[in-house]
Image (cartoon, grey):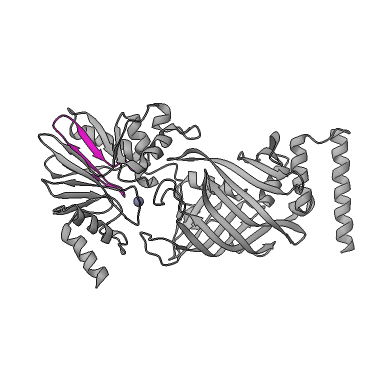
C-alpha cells in the first residue's frame, strides 16, 4: 500500500513538473479548469485514468419516444428490471442488458422483453432473445458511441485526453459548461456544478428524422461513494424534451469483470449500414383507381380522383416516402399528386411527412396532429439535411375532426378518426364506400400475434356503419373483413 501511494505521489509530481515546464507559471484556461475541477471532484485525475471498466446496475424506465398516444403525451413507458450497463472504459465498448415491460397496450403484447445491445468501436449491434446478433446502422452506432460519454467518468476521462479539444467555457444557472471534442472527433457538452464541481449533465447532438437536430441530454444526481470515486446513482436522459431513460442505480462496480464486450464476430465482419435500405415499392391495383404501394414494412395507398391523385401514408423517412411518391407519379403521370393522408403521428408513420411537404403535397391528418406537423416542418435539420431542408417549403395542412368526405365523379373516400384507440388518439382510417375497402394503420396488422387494438377498431367500424369487404393494412397483407372478426372471436372466447 505504501509503495502504491508513493508511486502515485511520484507520478503526480512528475506530471506537475512537466506541466510547469511546458506551461510556465500560466494558469489553466477556464475550459481546462472546468475539466480539472470535475476530475478532482470525482476522485482525482489519476484515479479516473486508472479505471478500466464500469458496471452500472439498476432499474427505471425507458420512454416511448415518438410512439405515445399523442405527440405531446409522455405517459407510456417501459419499466426496466435487471438493467446492466457494462462499459469497457479504456477500450471504448459498452453493452446494455435489460428486461423491459410496457406499462401500456403494446403491439407486441405486455409480456416482459429482454434486450441486449451495444457498441464496440464503430460497430453497433443488437442481440435477439434467441442469441442472434444483428448489426445496426452507422447512425445508431454513432448515437451509442456518443452515449458512452453520457457518464461523468467517461466524459471527464475523454476531456483529460491530450487529443481532446476543449472550447466555449461558459457559466449559467449555477453550472459551468465546456464543449469537449474527443480525440475521436465526437463533440459533447459537459456541465459541472459550480459549488460541488461534480458533473451535472452531458449533452450531445444527433439527427432524428422527425425532430431534426436534437439534443440528447443526460443529467446526473444523487452521487455516492464507490471505490474512491464519486458516481451518480440517478441518471436521466432526454431526447429533445422527451425522457427516454430514467435509471436508479442499485449497484455500481469499478474494474469488475465485464466479460467480453467485443462486438459479436458475426456483426463485426458484417458490412456497415450507411443508411436506410433502398426502397422497394411494388404496386398492386386493389380496385379501379386504388393501388397498394407495398414492398417493405410500411405500405401506402394511392387514390386516383378525376383530376388529381392522393396518397395515404408517407412513412418512415425520405427514402421510403420519396420512392412512394415517385411510384405514384409513375403510375399516373398525367395527374398531379396533390395530397397525402397521414394516418397518425407515430414517428415510423410520419417520418416521410417532411419529404411529402418538400414535394408540394398538402398534408391531411387528424386535427390533433396539426401542431405537431407544423413544428416538424419548422425544425432545423442541419446535421443530416433532408429533402425539406434542401428544398424548404411551408406546410399546407387540412385537418379531420369528425369526418372528411372526399368525392368527385370517379372516386369517393371518407376519412374518420378512430376514437378511443389505446394505440393513439391521432388515428385516421380511410373508407372507400363503393369498393368497401378500409385502410388502417397499426390497429389491425393481420400477421400480429396479439391484436390489442382490434376490438376498438371494430367498434369504430360499427359505430360508423361501414360495410367493409376487405381491410388494407399499412402493415401486412390485404385480408377479408372476416379475418378481423375471427381475431375478435378468438380474443373474446
Ligand atoms: Zn402507431
Residue 422 screen position, x and y as percent: 35, 57
Q: Is residue 434 above or below residue 228?
A: above
Residue 228 screen position, x and y as percent: 77, 59
- In the picture, measured across the screen, residue 195 lies left or right of residue 246, that is right
| Residue 474 visible (yes or no) | yes
Magenta stretch: includes residue 310? yes
Which span is picked out in magenta?
Answer: 292-315
In which quarter of the view is residue 103 placed? bottom left
Q: Quadrant of the N terminus?
A: bottom right
Q: Residue at x 46, y 47 (%)?
A: 137
Q: Residue at x 19, y 31 (%)?
A: 308
Q: Residue at x 36, y 43 (%)?
A: 368
Q: Is residue 478 above or below residue 275?
A: below
Q: Residue furthest bottom?
A: 493
| Residue 264 visible (yes or no) | no
Residue 231 screen position, x and y as percent: 70, 56
Q: Quadrant of the C terminus?
A: bottom left
| Total marks in image | 0
In which quarter of the view is residue 161 placed? top right
Q: Residue at x 37, y 27 (%)?
A: 394
Who is closer to the viewer here, 3 or 321? 321
In which quarter of the view is residue 170 placed? top right
Magenta stretch: includes residue 401? no
Amino acid at each position: 500500500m505504501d509503495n502504491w501511494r508513493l508511486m502515485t505521489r511520484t507520478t503526480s509530481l512528475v506530471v506537475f513538473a512537466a506541466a510547469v515546464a511546458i506551461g510556465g507559471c500560466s494558469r489553466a484556461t477556464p475550459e481546462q479548469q472546468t475539466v480539472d475541477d470535475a476530475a478532482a471532484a470525482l476522485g482525482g485525475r489519476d484515479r479516473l485514468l486508472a479505471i478500466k471498466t464500469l458496471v452500472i446496475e439498476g432499474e427505471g424506465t425507458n420512454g416511448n419516444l415518438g410512439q405515445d398516444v399523442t405527440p405531446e403525451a409522455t405517459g407510456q413507458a417501459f419499466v426496466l428490471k435487471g438493467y446492466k450497463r457494462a462499459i469497457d472504459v479504456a477500450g471504448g465498448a459498452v453493452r446494455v442488458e435489460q428486461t423491459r415491460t410496457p406499462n401500456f397496450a403494446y403491439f407486441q403484447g405486455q409480456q416482459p422483453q429482454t434486450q441486449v445491445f451495444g457498441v464496440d468501436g464503430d460497430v453497433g449491434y443488437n442481440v435477439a432473445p434467441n442469441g442472434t446478433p444483428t448489426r445496426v446502422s452507422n447512425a445508431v452506432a454513432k448515437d451509442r458511441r456518443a452515449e458512452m460519454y453520457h457518464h461523468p467518468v467517461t466524459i471527464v476521462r475523454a476531456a483529460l485526453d491530450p487529443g481532446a479539444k476543449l472550447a466555449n467555457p461558459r457559466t449559467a444557472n449555477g453550472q459551468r459548461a465546456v464543449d469537449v471534442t474527443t480525440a475521436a472527433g465526437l463533440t459533447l457538452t459537459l456541465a459541472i456544478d459550480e459549488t460541488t464541481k461534480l458533473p451535472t449533465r452531458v449533452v450531445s447532438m444527433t439527427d432524428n428524422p422527425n425532430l431534426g437536430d436534437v439534443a440528447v441530454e443526460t443529467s446526473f444526481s444523487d452521487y455516492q461513494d464507490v471505490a474512491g470515486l464519486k458516481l451518480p446513482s440517478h441518471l436521466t436522459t432526454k431526447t429533445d424534451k422527451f425522457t427516454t431513460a430514467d435509471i436508479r442505480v442499485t449497484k455500481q462496480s469499478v474494474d469488475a469483470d465485464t466479460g467480453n464486450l467485443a462486438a459479436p464476430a458475426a456483426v463485426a465482419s458484417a458490412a456497415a449500414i450507411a443508411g436506410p435500405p433502398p426502397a422497394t415499392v411494388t404496386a398492386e391495383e386493389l380496385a379501379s383507381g386504388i393501388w397498394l404501394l407495398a414492398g417493405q414494412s410500411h405500405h401506402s395507398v394511392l387514390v386516383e380522383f378525376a383530376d388529381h391523385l392522393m396518397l395515404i401514408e408517407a412513412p418512415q423517412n425520405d427514402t421510403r416516402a420519396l420512392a412512394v411518391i415517385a411510384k405514384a407519379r409513375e403510375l399516373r403521370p398525367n395527374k398531379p399528386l396533390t395530397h397525402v393522408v397521414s394516418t397518425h403521428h407515430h414517428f415510423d408513420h410520419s417520418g416521410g411527412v417532411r419529404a411529402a411537404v418538400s414535394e408540394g403535397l398538402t398534408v391531411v391528418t387528424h386535427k390533433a396532429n396539426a401542431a405537431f406537423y407544423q413544428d416538424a416542418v419548422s425544425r432545423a435539420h442541419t446535421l443530416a439535411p433532408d429533402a425539406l431542408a434542401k428544398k424548404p417549403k411551408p406546410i399546407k395542412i387540412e385537418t379531420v375532426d369528425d369526418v372528411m368526405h372526399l368525392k368527385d365523379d370517379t372516386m369517393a373516400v371518407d376519412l374518420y378518426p378512430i376514437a378511443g384507440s389505446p394505440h393513439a388518439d391521432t388515428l385516421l382510417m380511410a373508407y372507400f364506400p363503393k369498393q368497401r375497402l378500409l385502410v388502417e394503420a397499426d390497429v389491425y396488422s393481420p400477421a400480429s400475434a396479439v391484436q390489442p387494438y382490434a376490438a376498438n377498431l371494430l367498434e369504430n367500424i360499427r359505430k360508423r356503419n361501414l360495410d367493409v369487404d376487405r381491410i388494407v393494412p399499412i402493415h401486412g397483407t390485404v385480408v377479408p373483413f372476416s379475418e378481423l372478426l375471427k381475431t375478435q372471436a378468438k380474443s373474446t372466447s
